Amino acid sequence: MSYISFYSDGELRAYLFERGLNLSQASLFMLLQSIDKYAEQHGNYSGVKTSNAKLASELNLTTRTITKNLTELEKKELIKINYDRSISTNTKRIIKPLKLVKYTLESQINGLMGYINTFLNSNPENWEVLEKDDLEIRDELKNAIYYFGSDKAVINYINSNRDKLINYNDLIDWLLNFSTP
């Protein structure tokens, strides 16, 4: 079972607008993602190989607008454009859209637990690690994620306070600070 879920169309559109894209850029990105997803379902993982004219026709835009939008999407690192020059007389452009995923709280807890266990294992004096099935520990990790805002922020805190949290018991005591009464 995967804990990763892809953005719905509405969430994706809102995310793209937050990143500063306009409607035509967001629509182009979503079209590229749809084409790429279809291609991957049929075994083609290299990316989208289509012309600006076809994209313009699909979105009812001009080819010049498509060219500008592709440049903007590449600047914002939402797509990667490569060229296949294996046939010298026929260069093909390959557009690979970024896979935008959001991580559920469960996946963040699992990732954070794995990171902490690796961190604890780096200290030869530690004999214990966080147990994956321990619901109390999972709740403490969830509370820490809520407190810091993300699993990455928790990891950054741990990294900046390594000397205080390298011991299993110290780490557990620290996690108890985020308990809800």
Image: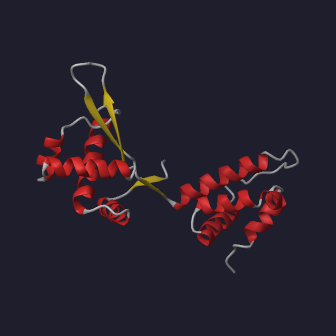
- Taking the image as shown, residue 50 lies to the left or right of residue 136, namely left
Give coordinates of residue 84: x percent, y percent: 31, 27
Q: Which residue: 30% across, 42% down?
A: 37
Task: Give the farthest residue toward the right.
Answer: 125
Give coordinates of residue 64: x percent, y percent: 16, 49
Residue nearest the observer in this picture, 1 or 172: 172
Give coordinates of residue 96: x percent, y percent: 34, 40
Q: Which residue: 66% across, 54% down?
A: 113
- Residue 138 visible, this orientation: no
- Residue 152 visible, this orientation: yes
- Taking the image as shown, residue 176 lies to the left or right of residue 33, namely right
**Number of numbered tags placed on the structure image:** 0
Q: Which residue: 85% across, 49% down?
A: 126
Q: Which residue: 62% across, 72% down?
A: 147
Location of residue 38 by image quarter: top left
In the rendered view, would you say 83 is above or below 26?
Answer: above
Asked which colour scheme the image uses, the reply is secondary structure
Task: Give the farthest residue toward the bottom.
Answer: 181
Residue nearest the observer in this picture, 101 or 134: 101
Give coordinates of residue 21: x percent, y percent: 31, 61
- Taking the image as shown, residue 109 lies to the left or right of residue 8, namely right
- Taking the image as shown, residue 140 lies to the left or right of residue 88, namely right
Q: Is the C terminus in the top left, top right, bottom left or bottom right quadrant?
A: bottom right
In the rendered view, would you say 75 is above or below 82?
Answer: below
In the rendered view, would you say 92 is above or below 113?
Answer: above
Location of residue 15 by image quarter: bottom left
Residue nearest the observer in this picture, 106 or 85: 85
